[in-house]
Image: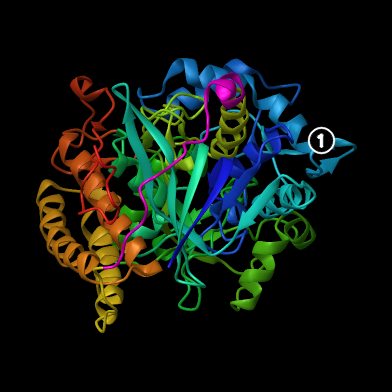
Amino acid sequence: MTSTRNTDILIIGSGLSGLSLALSMPKNFNILIVTKDKLDSCSTAWAQGGIAAVIGNNDSLASHIKDTIDNGHGLCNLDVVNEIINNGPECINWLEENQIQFTRINNQIDLTLEGGHSNRRISYIKDQTGRFLHNGLTSVIKTIDNVTILENTQIIDLIHEYNDNEKRCLGAYLYNKDTHKVTTVKSKFSILATGGASKIYQYTTNPHTSTGDGIAAAWRAGCTVTNMEFIQFHPTCLYHPENKSFLISESLRGEGAKLLGKDLQPFMHHYDSRCELAPRDVVARAIDNEIKTKGLKCVFLDITMKDKTFITNRFPAIYEKCLKMGIEISEELIPVVPASHYTCGGVQVDISGETEIKNLFVIGEAAHTGFHGANRLASNSLLECVVMARKCAENILSRNSAVSLTSSVPPWDDSYVTESSEKFKLSHNWDDLRKIMWNYVGIIRTKKNLSLANEKISLIEKEVNQYYQKYYITSDLLELRNIIQISKLIIKSAMSRKESRGLHFTKDYPLSNDIFCKNTEILGRENEYKSRVVKFKV
């Protein structure tokens, strides 16, 4: 059974970019926000660090721009970098106007330091910036009558058509995990704010929802994806058998914490003169190398030089979490390992999120604007979310009068599929794929391993394609379909970049090569799978 609903604005994703867009739109728009789990089950709510923006007296926009470009290893879009960073101070003001209260000292926003930054410019809220941001904006959203929220609902595919030789997005097919029903949503404007794809790796700091759904759906619809080889691994994820996805914020290193390796000796000075405050790609590779060459299970983060009162006030959530795990971080070392954290590539868009498909926008981590280049600068991601959302709202308003809701869309049809008795295969393939990506397409890569990963995932893909054609869809099946496609896009991009640059390091080509100082673009595909919709009659 299927149903149909209409809306002016369809926002798929409930993180900072999606919420900021909804809050930036006038009240005369009907807005539908769709999230595939609970409203706060998103990467934004898990973010600990903060938002990078120049508001300190000793800082400058030029310095922030330079730090971003330096970290991007030659692949940043300079116009986008300038535009986003110049909008940073205004974004902080806008968030404060929407009930966000950053940590203050002497009535001034306190600023912290993170790797790759030359100045203290990170506005934060204790060590749970993302949670407070999300809770604050959600409380405002819930007071707005023109916004409807659909939880436990995920995208299946976008709906599009050709009109006067121009591809136009008409809405999306959505699957509800509670009712197992499909809803056809017709919208004037569709926005994918679905976040990244770090869940494709065995170890990640992201929530389980980060499966690249929006990137995959946009690619299937025909959008170009760019620089998918640049997956950022956060250097410090808690290493503990009871919790394998808890992030230990980079802000600890910004406040003086040291990384210790074999025999509990510091090692970062062997890799970079900035030591613990080197960019994430450098620190993650250094930790990975220490673990592999020294036969370690993990390295340790030491913040015991700080007073306990300072630690509990500055990092209350990390302190309490580690204490529950039996680690008193004011007295003991924190065991850490790198884990997948952020997708620097994504759907190719401009700063407003506009794609190749008319009336389709992609914003936030799912998008590629050229802001991050080959390595995202810490705390630039939340800044990009807010700026893109506000620019997206401006774009939509400028063209709204010329867009009308389509009268009809092709209906969803699952009349030829049956219930599966082999659902165990989905879980098995899920686990296999994430291990393959971790072991073969991780921090350090080789041509041989990339080729092996592609072969192994192609076998899984064939099986899942057959499963998709025969049986009713489920949430796990939809996510598995997406992570297979995202994984293959990452591998294809990585195999084409015959150099090492930023987050992409390969033993076969350990040095950067000016020939490859360019973006890796993969054109979109429309019919990866047989469609389950009834086509328009010609």
From the top left corner, tell me how far across and down residue 48 is, in percent: 62, 52
Residue 111 lies left or right of residue 234; in this view the side is: right
Please tell me whether residue 397 belongs to the stretch shown in magenta.
Answer: yes
| Quadrant (top left/top right/bottom left/bottom right) for the N terminus | bottom left
Identity of the residue drawn at 36% across and 56% down: 412
Task: Give the main secondary structure of the magenta stretch.
Answer: loop
Most extreme residue toward the bottom is: 421
The type of colouring in the image is rainbow
Residue 378 lies left or right of residue 520; in this view the side is: right
Q: Residue 316 is drawn in which quadrant?
A: bottom right
From the top left corner, tell me how far across and down residue 270 is, in percent: 38, 43
Q: Is residue 502 shown to the viewer in this render?
A: no
Q: Is residue 357 shown to the viewer in this render?
A: yes
Residue 230 lies left or right of residue 240; in this view the side is: left
Give the amino acid type for the residue marked by disc 1 in the picture. Answer: Glu
Q: Nearer the viewer, residue 521 or 145?
A: 145
Residue 392 lies left or right of residue 342; in this view the side is: right
From the top left corner, tell me how far across and down residue 239 is, in percent: 46, 68
Identity of the residue drawn at 84% across and 34% down: 108
Q: Nearer the viewer, residue 39 or 99?
A: 39
Please tell me whether residue 7 belongs to the stretch shown in magenta.
Answer: no
Say what secondary structure mark 1 lies in.
helix
Q: Nearer the viewer, residue 85 or 177?
A: 177
- Reading the image, the residue beneath label 1 is 97
Q: Around disc 1, counting alpha carbons within 10 Å, would you say few (fewer than 14), some (14 to 19), or many (20 or more)?
A: few
Range drawn in magenta: 396-415
Q: Residue 20 is drawn in which quadrant?
A: top right
Identity of the residue drawn at 67% across and 36% down: 29
From the top left corner, tell me how far across and down residue 456 is, in percent: 13, 62
